[in-house]
Amino acid sequence: MSNGSKRKIMTGVVVSDKMDKTLVVRVERKFAHPVFKKVIKTTKKYKVHDEKNECQEGDFIRIGETRPLSKEKRWRLLEVITKISPVEAEKVAQS
């Protein structure tokens, strides 16, 4: 992406890596309720293109908006912020 890009960038946690070259990422968003001013936490899942299959469940990643790659994929993996350790990966697989 170029420096003058207006494309959205988000961070989230990988929920599923079972598909080939595709991840499901959960992005959490906090905002104040318009009337009651209480902080509300919402989550949304996005399908993300991972060309090298480098991520696994539990990784914390940064994703960027891109052209439609398939019916539901409109995001691309930009970088892996935190990689999950093999011990933690085993715990995630057991649960």
Image (cartoon, rainbow, N blue to C red):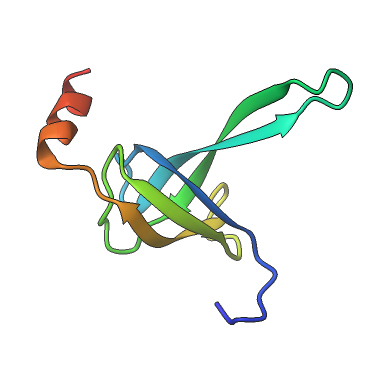
Residue occupying the point 65% across, 65% down: 7
**Residue drawn at (68%, 24%) of the image:** 40
Residue for point 40% across, 51% down: 61
**Is residue 83 shown above or below 45?**
below
**Of residues 45 and 11, the one drawn nearer to the viewer in this rendering:** 11
Drawn side of residue 41 relative to residue 16, left or right? right
Quadrant of residue 58 in the image? Answer: top left
Tell how many labels. 0
Q: Is residue 91 above or below residue 66?
A: above
* Vertical position of residue 25 compared to residue 1: above or below: above
- Residue 20 percent coordinates (x, y): 30, 50
**Relative to residue 53, is residue 36 drawn left or right?**
right
Residue 51 placement (x, y as % from top left): 34, 63
Could you tell whether 60 is left or right of 89 in the image?
Answer: right
Q: Quadrant where the N terminus lies?
A: bottom right
Which residue ends up furthest to the front in the rendered image? 37
Residue 28 image offset from top left, x and y in percent: 55, 35
Q: Position of residue 54 (x, y in %)?
A: 25, 56
Q: Residue at x 53, y 43 (%)?
A: 46
Q: Quadrant of the C terminus?
A: top left
User: In the image, is 88 to the left or to the right of 9?
Assistant: left
Considering every residue shown, the one lying at the far right of the view is 35
